[in-house]
């Protein structure tokens, strides 16, 4: 478990809130936010004398003193800090992390759990979480509440609240507002390929939640991490027959200033540290060449949302959404480009788009 916690923590030391989170703690000695899991690592580091579990610039938590005493604190403080591989896979839980240094993207390919009758799962198949330059830009919305507000409970676990693709306004897994702890397991995500490497990482997965539509659809998502150019390319393929409506969404973290630029790129900005994230829709090469009959270009819009970092509390946030109605098969590419405070956004955008176009032409 400690290995997994170390891997899924973002560079800012916080945890992605995938699925339900009611701020419960295994060791409730110090009250902590729902996304504060780093104290578990300190205990693991001291107990197992494992430097990989010691987080840089993270002091000894109070739990360490209460549970292991002064010797435990000394054991922890004498451990060196070592770097770990940022890109890791945990197939049994469906978590795939593609990152390096201050860049972090997590792909969620988990099912709804509990032998196909999930109780604490959300409709978040193939959703992503992105942190860069010290800022969580694309986030899971969290849970907010359970039975205190059934409508809010329903929203926070819905497909439209997560950074994935929605087809025909349908849910990935069947859910009902009146049954807050029941969720189907129609999506059943499956990972086909995981290729970590020195220059790039790749993960390919698909889910089958839209197979129950009258004209079935399969959603396949490919995520590539270009380490030299420091950006991710997300390719969403929708396979099947017929004409459908699609919504490609990215749930932006609270507290960020988000806008649609004149060039159509969505920009999320952290006013505190000056970091930005650019989300650029790239029309696949086959669509650039062929007639636009029965096709509609994706247009970005900003949808009001909420995010919850702790149970019972929420903050306003934004979902960037590209929508279209067109015939299958259909694919859309999105370049996710971090721009740190002192970087030139034109240079960052240019190098990433050139690399993305080259990759699409090769495919």
Image (cartoon, rainbow, N blue to C red):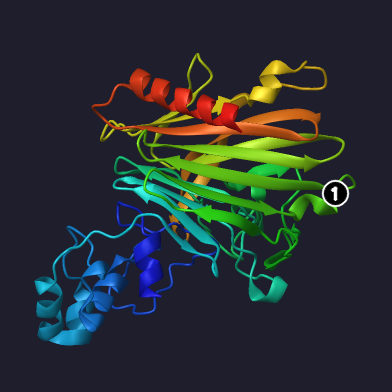
Query: What count of labels does the image hold?
Result: 1
Residue extending farthest to the front is 362
**Residue 91 in the image, given as x and y percentages of width and height:** 54, 66
Q: Position of residue 124 (x, y in %)?
A: 61, 54
Q: Residue at x 53, y 58 (%)?
A: 143
Q: Is residue 130 left or right of residue 203?
A: left
Q: Residue at x 82, y 17 (%)?
A: 293
Q: Which residue is mark 1?
A: 213
- The one of 141 and 100 positioned closer to us in this rendering: 100
Q: Is residue 259 depicted above or below 67 in this figure? A: above
- Image quarter where the N terminus lies is bottom left
Residue 215 coordinates in the image, percent (x, y): 88, 44
Q: Residue at x 68, y 34 (%)?
A: 331
Q: Is residue 311 above or below residue 204?
A: below
Left or right placement of residue 123 versus residue 281 in this view: right
- Taking depth in this image into account, of 254 and 108 the one nearest to the observer is 108
Disc 1 crowd rating (10 Å Cα; few below 14, some 14-19, many 20+) is few
Give residue 3's position: percent from left, percent from top.
37, 71
Task: State which quarter of the image contains the C terminus.
Answer: top right
* Residue toward you, 270 or 156: 270
Element at badge 1? loop
Compared with 7, 277 (above or below) is above
């Amino acid at each position: 478990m400690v290995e997994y916690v170390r891997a899924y923590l973002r560079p800012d030391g916080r945890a992605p809130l995938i699925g339900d989170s009611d701020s419960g703690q295994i060791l409730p000695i110090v009250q902590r936010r729902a996304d504060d899991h780093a104290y578990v690592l300190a205990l693991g580091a001291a107990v197992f004398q494992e430097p990989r579990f010691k987080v840089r610039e993270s002091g000894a938590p109070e739990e360490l003193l209460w549970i292991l005493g002064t010797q435990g604190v000394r054991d922890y403080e004498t451990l060196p800090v070592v770097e770990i591989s940022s890109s890791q896979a945990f197939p049994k839980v469906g978590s795939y992390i593609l990152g390096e240094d201050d860049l972090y993207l997590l792909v969620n390919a988990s099912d709804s759990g509990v032998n196909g009758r999930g109780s604490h799962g959300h409709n978040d198949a193939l959703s992503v979480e992105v942190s860069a330059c010290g800022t969580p830009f694309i986030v899971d919305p969290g849970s907010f509440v359970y039975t205190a507000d059934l409508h809010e409970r329903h929203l926070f676990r819905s497909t439209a609240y997560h950074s994935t693709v929605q087809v025909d306004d349908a849910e990935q897994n069947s859910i009902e507002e009146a049954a807050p702890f029941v969720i189907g397991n129609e999506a059943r995500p499956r990972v086909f390929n995981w290729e970590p490497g020195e220059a790039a990482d790749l993960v390919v997965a698909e889910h089958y939640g839209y197979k129950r539509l009258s004209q079935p659809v399969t959603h396949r998502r490919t995520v590539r991490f270009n380490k030299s150019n420091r950006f991710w390319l997300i390719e969403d393929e929708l396979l099947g027959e017929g004409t459908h409506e699609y919504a490609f969404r990215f749930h932006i973290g609270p507290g960020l200033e988000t806008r649609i630029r004149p060039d159509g790129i969505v920009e999320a900005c952290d006013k505190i540290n000056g970091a930005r994230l650019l989300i650029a829709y790239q029309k696949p090469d086959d669509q650039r060449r062929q007639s636009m009959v029965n096709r509609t270009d994706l247009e970005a819009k900003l949808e009001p949302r909420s995010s919850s970092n702790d149970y019972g509390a929420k903050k306003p946030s934004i979902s960037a959404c590209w929508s279209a109605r067109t015939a299958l098969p259909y694919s859309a590419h999105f370049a996710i480009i971090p721009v740190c405070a002192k970087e030139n956004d034109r240079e960052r955008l240019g190098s990433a788009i050139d690399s993305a176009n080259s990759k699409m032409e090769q495919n």
